[in-house]
Structure formats: C-alpha cells, structure tokens
Amino acid sequence: MIEIAPAAPRSTPIRWLRLLPWLAAVVVLALLLWRIPLDEVLAAVGRGPVGWLALYSLFEAVAVLPADAWATRVTLSAAGVKRPFGELFLVRGSTYLLNVLSYAVGQGGLGVYLARTGVRAARSAGIVLFLLATNAIALALVAAVAHPFAQRTDARAAIAIGVVLYGVKTYLTALAARGLFARTRFGRWMATHLEKEPVATLARAGLLGHLKATAARIPHVAVLLLVLWGSFRVWGIEVPLGVGLAALPAVVLIAALPITPSGLGTAQALQVLLFAPFVAGATPAARSATLLGFSLVHHALGLAGQVAVGAVCFMLLKRRGIPALAGSPAGNDRPAEDSEEPTPKEGAAEPGK
C-alpha cells in the first residue's frame, strides 16, 4: 500500500506583506534616532506637559468628529446614498478605532458599513474612493490658500503643494470632460457598457458632486488642522498659524498613506523636517529631539483619544442595534432609494455627471 505524504503547506507571502508597514516604521524610526540622540528625545519627553497633551488629544478627537460626520454625510449624498446624521456620527466615530491601523482602513470601515446596510460592495468601494479623493482635494486647497501667509516654510513644501494641485486640476478636468462627453450618444453608450465599479461611482458623482463634497470637507479639514496646530502650542512649540495651515496638510497626507501603521515614523520624519526650526533649543540636534519627542507622544496620545471616542460610539451603535457594526450584516431595513445602486443607464444619462 502506497502512502501519500501530506502536501506541504504553501508559503503565504501575503502574511509577510502584512508585516512590511511595521518594518517600514521601524526603519524610519531607526534612521531618525540614528541622527537624533535617543537620550535627548527621552529628556525632551520628560520635560514636556504629557498630561495636558493627553487631555488635549482627547479634545482633538471630540472636536473633529462632528465636522467629519457632516462632511461624510454630504459626500454620501453626492454619491446618491442618504444616511441620517446621527447614525453617521456614531458610525464615523466607531471607525476611529480602525485608525490605529491606518486612515485608509478607517475609511474602509465606512465601506463595510455601507455594504452591510444595503449598498452593493463594489459601489461601497467606489464611495470610499470618493471620500478619499475629496479629502485629498480639500487638504490641497487649504494648503494652497494658507501657503502665501506662511513664513519660513521649506521650499520643498511649496513644490509638493504645486504637484498635488496639478494632480487635482487634472482629475477635475477629466471629470468635467467626462460629464460633457456623457451627453453624447456614444458617451452614454460607453458609460452604460464600459464604466464599472468602483470607478463608475466617481464618474457618476461628476464634477459638481466632487465640488459639493469638497466644499463640505473643507470645514472638517480646517478644524483638523487647527487642533493639530494647537497641539504644538500645548507642548510649547510656537509654530506660526500660517505655517501650520500650509505645512500640516502634507503631514496629514503622508500619515494617511498605507506606508506605515497610522503614519508612524513617516509623519514624525516630516514634522522634524518642517517644524524643528520653530523649537526653542541651543542646537539643531536639541531642537530636533524636542520635536521628535513631541511628535511621538502626540501620535500615541492622539490614537488613544481616537480609540476612546471610537469605543464610546461603538457602544452606542450596539445599543441602537445598527447591523453594520453591532450585529448581523444581513439585516437591512433601508428604503430602496437609499440602498440600491442606480442602473448605469440612469447614472450616465444625467447631464454633468
């Protein structure tokens, strides 16, 4: 009798890929600490008002959430999905728990909520892309408006703003051109047969939908940047307001990229580069050490504040029995106009979208 040896387990490179962001964070932090003495960083942390910053970090999460939820509601409406503000307030707050991994994962939590409350999965993914795109556009616009009022900013920040704005212009121009082309018979045929999710959601939102969602996102971005700027002041770092509003969008954007978990390391490196000159210190190394110590502490406390707010919102969601996060994903009592995806023909025939 021939015995067949069990097949060897297949290698799972995907599991190793999951470790890459953490490895990237370790590498970036190691490079920072190679240039900046660790003992000076620890000394700066010991001198800093950690308790006050902890309270302020909780205030940050509480202050940002209402504007975030309102902008999210407007963006969903522009994409053809209506949800009550009170529910979105709790859902968006609950997704702050996922920000510990990354901002993109937190936004993905909204996609899961939509998919579990009647929106098709592919369309939910498109709406998440819509949210990410309008967030980036709003950050770029605020940075561009604030940059002329900033002083002593790194020239590379101005170049980065210019590159991002060029990308925004190209993206919005393509949307406008698509809206005009969709009015033709051939354009309607292409929209019906060739546009697939998740890109179709972006196309259906159109230029006007993007502008509406971006306008609603700007107050959220303004509140976010103001509270982030205020955290420097809590630590005693006197960053001018114009500099903060012009440079902090770059920090927010790089922290949102899934390079490292929740931007750990990448955000600190950019903050040291942009804001160390505003720190009081005898030497450049001392100023960088103070800034790095502040950035690491604020990063940890900021995530803790978001987790605290997210936990409260999640518990309230469970009490309300919303199926997205508190129970079975199958249950859904949404009205059809809120949950069903419009047919491609209907979406393509609307002028300007």
Image (cartoon, rainbow, N blue to C red):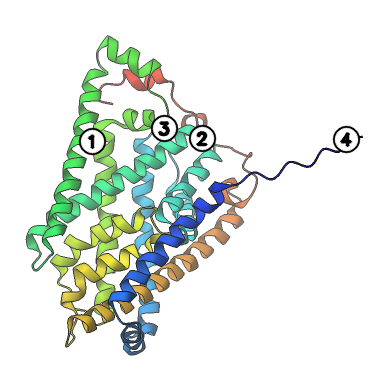
- Above-or-below relation of 178 to 107: above
Upstream in sequence: badge 2 or badge 4 = 4
Upstream in sequence: badge 2 or badge 3 = 2
What amino acid type should be assigned to the residue bearing mark 3? Pro
Q: Which residue does the image show at 14% across and 58% down from the upper left?
A: 156
Please tell me in which quadrant of the rendered image residue 77 appears: top left
Label disc, if present, on residue 171 of the rendered structure? 1
What amino acid type should be assigned to the residue bearing mark 1? Tyr
The residue at which mark 2 appears reads as: 121
- Taking the image as shown, residue 222 lies to the left or right of residue 312, namely left
The residue at which mark 3 appears reads as: 198
3D distance between C-alphas at marks 3 and 1:
16 Å
Q: Position of residue 259 (x, y in %)?
A: 38, 55
Crowd class of label 3 (few under 14; some 14 to 19; many from 20; radius 10 Å): some
3D distance between C-alphas at marks 4 and 1:
63 Å
What amino acid type should be assigned to the residue bearing mark 2? Ala
